[in-house]
Image (cartoon, rainbow, N blue to C red):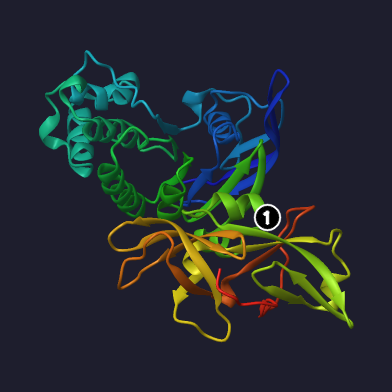
């Protein structure tokens, strides 16, 4: 097994910067997900590791070997593509066996390896069929088996589940996680689907505009986003962001967000480059309940009942907030409700730099008025 290191890697396509001074280490046996919007550089990064693209500068190491000038076939990696890339005229058996035949593997060994690998991904009964006779999920399993049969040191996966329906994606995620646990092969997986990233990964590398914005566990990137981009990109529905201004009152520093105020320690407030701050509130950290001393009046603007939960668009003091809540009774547009926030789960950001402000805890103060919306 191997680790992978990218040191100061750059890749441009004309004037477009695809990968910008990327430094990243993928540990041996790790499942790392490259996550980000379209055009962020994640697929280019994967292709650089695979040897399908060459870096303009910087170094790529696979294990202890400098891989910059190694051909794809000499890197001992297997890649699974979004479109499966199966040979349509070959039976499933021959598609899986192809990498072994290229290596002149003995026929008897090919037979046993193909059947063993097909069994591993649950397609042992499909070996005589051709790709056109298979469902999308079955074709994806064939593509996985073809990658697995080589016993590579490294798996590279480029959005392999994006063409599957929602139910099958969930099923295949479970299979991939199980396979990784059993085989322990270092895996780098590209996706723009944050749910896939959160459920599959040991760590997530979040990219945007060719830059690495944050690297951490699913818990870290969700609970401690490094900046506003990560905060807004990770989570569905997206995090609510409310702008406010930092003011000083009798030696106390308060960030006023209309719906509430946050007190900042003097030593932190005086280091900020901007007086404009942003409060981040996850939809599930908005509590819709009975009136309490810290609650705020809000009016329901939109409801999206999902059965086990409801997504609500709420208007609180002309601030629109999305809440994800489980209520015992349905709410209708126009209903008045009282909301409060889970204080220890709120986030605070500096608008100018977009960075997260690390506070020991966030203390909310009541807004000046709690009149119904």
Q: Give the residue displayed 53% in from the left and 43% down from the top.
A: 34
Q: Secondary structure at mark 1?
A: loop
Residue 300 x, y percent position in the rendering? 46, 62
- Which is more toward the observer, 326 or 52? 326
**Residue 361 visible to the viewer:** no
Residue bearing the label numbered 1? 227
Residue 223: image location, x then y, percent:
56, 65
| Front residue (pair 222, 110) | 222
Question: Depth check: 296 or 162 in front?
Answer: 296
Q: Quadrant of residue 11?
A: top right
Among the 4 quarters of the image, the one containing residue 137: top left
Residue 302 in the image: above or below residue 114: below
Left/right placement of residue 240 relative to residue 116 reads right
151 vs 255: above or below: above
Q: Is residue 175 above or below residue 22?
A: below
Closest to the observer, 212 or 104: 212
- Where residue 262 sits in the image (x, y, percent)? 71, 74
What crowding class fits label 1: few (fewer than 14 Cα within 10 Å), some (14-19), or many (20 or more)? many
Give the farthest residue toward the top: 89
Q: Does the image show residue 72?
A: yes
Q: Is the residue 244 above or below the residue 19 in the image?
A: below
- Screen quadrant of the C terminus: bottom right
Question: In the shown orientation, is residue 250 left or right of residue 117?
Answer: right
In this rendering, would 320 be left or right of 174?
right
- Residue 280, image x, y percentages: 62, 62
At horizontal 68% and vertical 55% (from top left) the residue drawn is 227
């Amino acid at each position: 097994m191997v680790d992978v290191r990218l040191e100061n890697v750059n890749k441009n396509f004309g004037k477009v910067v695809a990968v910008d001074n990327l430094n990243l280490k993928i540990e041996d046996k790790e499942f790392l997900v490259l996550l980000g919007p379209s055009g962020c550089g994640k697929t280019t990064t994967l292709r650089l590791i695979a040897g399908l693209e060459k870096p303009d500068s910087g170094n790529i190491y696979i294990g202890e070997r400098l891989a910059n000038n190694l051909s794809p076939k000499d890197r001992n990696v297997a890649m699974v593509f979004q479109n499966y890339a199966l040979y349509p005229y070959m039976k499933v058996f021959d598609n899986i066996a192809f990498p072994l035949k290229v290596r002149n593997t003995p026929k008897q060994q090919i037979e046993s390896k193909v059947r063993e690998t097909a069994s591993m991904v649950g397609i042992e009964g499909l070996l005589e069929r051709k790709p056109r006779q298979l469902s999308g999920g079955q074709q994806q399993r064939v593509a996985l088996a073809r990658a697995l049969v080589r016993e590579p040191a490294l798996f590279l996966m480029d959005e392999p589940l994006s063409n599957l329906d929602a139910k099958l994606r969930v099923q295949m995620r479970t299979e991939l996680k199980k396979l990784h646990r059993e085989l322990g092969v270092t895996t780098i997986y590209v996706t723009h689907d944050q749910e896939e990233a959160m459920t599959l990964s040991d760590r997530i590398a979040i990219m945007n505009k060719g830059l690495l914005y944050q690297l951490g566990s699913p818990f870290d990137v969700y609970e401690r986003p490094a900046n506003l981009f990560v905060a807004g990109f990770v989570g569905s529905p997206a995090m609510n962001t409310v702008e406010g201004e930092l003011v000083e009152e009798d030696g106390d520093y308060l960030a006023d967000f209309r719906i509430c105020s946050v007190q900042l320690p003097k030593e932190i407030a005086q280091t900020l480059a901007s007086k404009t701050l942003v409060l981040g509130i996850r939809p599930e950290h908005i509590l819709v309940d009975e009136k309490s001393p810290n609650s705020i009046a809000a009016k329901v603007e939109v409801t999206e009942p999902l059965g086990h939960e409801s997504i609500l668009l709420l208007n609180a003091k002309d601030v629109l907030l999305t809440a994800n809540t489980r209520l015992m009774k349905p709410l209708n547009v126009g209903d008045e409700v009282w909301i409060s926030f889970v204080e220890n789960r709120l986030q605070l950001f500096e608008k100018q730099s977009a960075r997260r402000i690390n506070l020991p805890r966030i203390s909310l103060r009541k807004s000046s008025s709690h009149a119904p919306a």
